[in-house]
Image: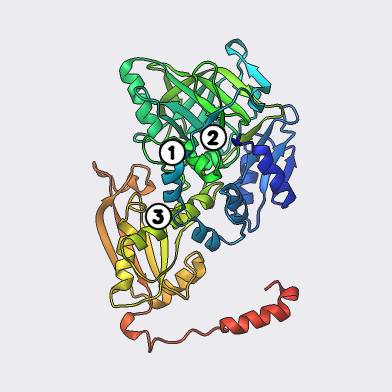
Amino acid sequence: MPNSLDLRNWLDAMKQAENLKVLRGADWNLELGAISEMNVKQAGHPALLFDEIPGYPDGHRVLTCTTSSPYRLSSILRATQTYQHRELVQWLRGKPKEWQSRAANFPPVAVETGPVFENVVDKEHVNILDFPSPLWHEGDGGRYIGTGCAVVTRDYDSDWVNVGTYRVMVHDETHVGLDMVSGKHGQIQYQKYVQAGEPFPVCIVIGADPLCYLISGIEVPYGMCEWNYIGAILDEPVAVVHGELTGLPFPSGAEIVLEGFIYPGDTRMEGPFGEFHGYYQAGAKPTSVMSVERVYYRNQPIIVGSPPAKPPNDYSYSKAVMRSALLFDALLAAGVPGVEGVWAHEIGGARMFTVASIKQRYAGHARQCGHVLSQCGVAAYMGRYVVVVDDDIDPANLEEVMWAVATRSDPVYDIDFIQNAMGSKNDPMSVAYKSKAMFSSRAIIDACRPFDHIDDFPPVAQASQKLQEEVRERWGHLLKL
């Protein structure tokens, strides 16, 4: 049976697992965003479903913090349920390549109808302000209805359907700004319509199973449809309906879908809005505008929000897990042995601070690992720091990592630099080190015990693993060890 990507099935599962909290009365104007931002920084935090939002009918809801814990993310990915990110990274290794290879076997299946058609609003009555789009942060240029969204487009000269996550700002009752940055698949498709002088058809899925926006926000190969990729993860095809104006496919169980066109030359000022690293990198700029000409939505619709902010933010955990698995596989593919763990830290937006732990086997092993990790395809874009630690250090534990840096490295001998590496205008440091060709530098920190002194390096002063387990079994119920 095809899967309609119904968000409410997932919400029911999270309620049962006590991984969802309903909050009533939070204001769309900054309060909802601040609560979500503060929530995601707490250990063991739940997903948040906001209801009774002032100024809107009860049942017009906003959902946040969906992918920000190992339990919820493993549920979304249909993985073995776990509360441990290391287990999730290990499960995920090799999966993207497998899903890509199987995607062609799962084309979406068209169905006649679905819950998304419970309400259909035609052009004359469209009013996007009927939905409680949040103003997430004080510095934002406007209200953003699309953060945890999926934007459906079609190639001009082929049948390739792309589904990407691009931010969507509300301009007025019938127009939204769509920020598709250069090089992204949606922007490539859009430019073909611009060159042909024709309107660009768009459908924006504002709410669905979180797997929808999770996958539309990663690097799926050019020419591959994300509905196929999602089908491979689910092991069953996605059930889609087609927009009545554009013919574009979207999930039959979607919460809200905006359908319309970007007309040639139609732009307005959009932003500013935060980036994944936690800064307002750019101010307001001209961005393409979509004229919303039809809206489909379910009764008591839910906006899925996933706004960027200073990490950890709403979606930084999911990026960290998925990129860590890809980096682990990249190290092994490059022939680096003895890799015990990899973690792309949320504090660096899962790009700018990466740690690998290894079991050292030979002189130069740590340096080899660090340089490969810094420059492999998955990590090359907008990297900054790479740290390599011994296998007794948890690469995801910043206290342990920085302890190793402080006690097992020497600044003169153990830090290598790479200049003129791949940079980006989205790097907040680009304002200080401007270059025409957006270069940046890298630091590789070898925080492993010196290989030629492994045997005589001072031993660690701590309880053995065996003793810790014995103590936890006897005293853990009293001290929450």
Front-lying residue, 219 or 389: 219
Residue 152 is situated, as x and y percent measured from the top left of the image, at 48, 29
The residue under the point 60% across, 39% down is 209
In front: mark 1 or mark 3? Answer: 1
For the C terminus, the quadrant is bottom right
Residue 306 horizontal side relative to residue 275, left or right: right
Q: Is residue 132 above or below residue 124?
A: below
The residue carrying mark 2 is 149
Q: How far across and down, in percent of the image, does residue 133 sit?
A: 61, 30
Label 2 close to label 3 by CB (< 8 Å): no
Q: Label 3, secondary structure: give it.
A: loop
Judged from this view, the residue extending furthest toward the top is 124
Q: Amino acid at mark 3?
A: Met
Q: Residue at x 54, y 30 (%)?
A: 109
Secondary element at tag 1: helix
Q: Earlier in the sequence, mark 2 or mark 3?
A: 2
Q: Residues within 10 Å of mark 3 (few under 14, many from 20)?
A: many
Q: Please name the amino acid that badge 2 sits on.
A: Cys
Residue that carries the numbered disc 3 in the rendered image: 352
Secondary structure at badge 2 equals: loop
Q: Is residue 480 above or below residue 44?
A: below
Q: Residues within 10 Å of mark 1 (few under 14, many from 20)?
A: some
Q: Earlier in the sequence, mark 1 or mark 2?
A: 1
Q: Earlier in the sequence, mark 1 or mark 3?
A: 1
Image x and y of residue 292, in percent:
53, 19
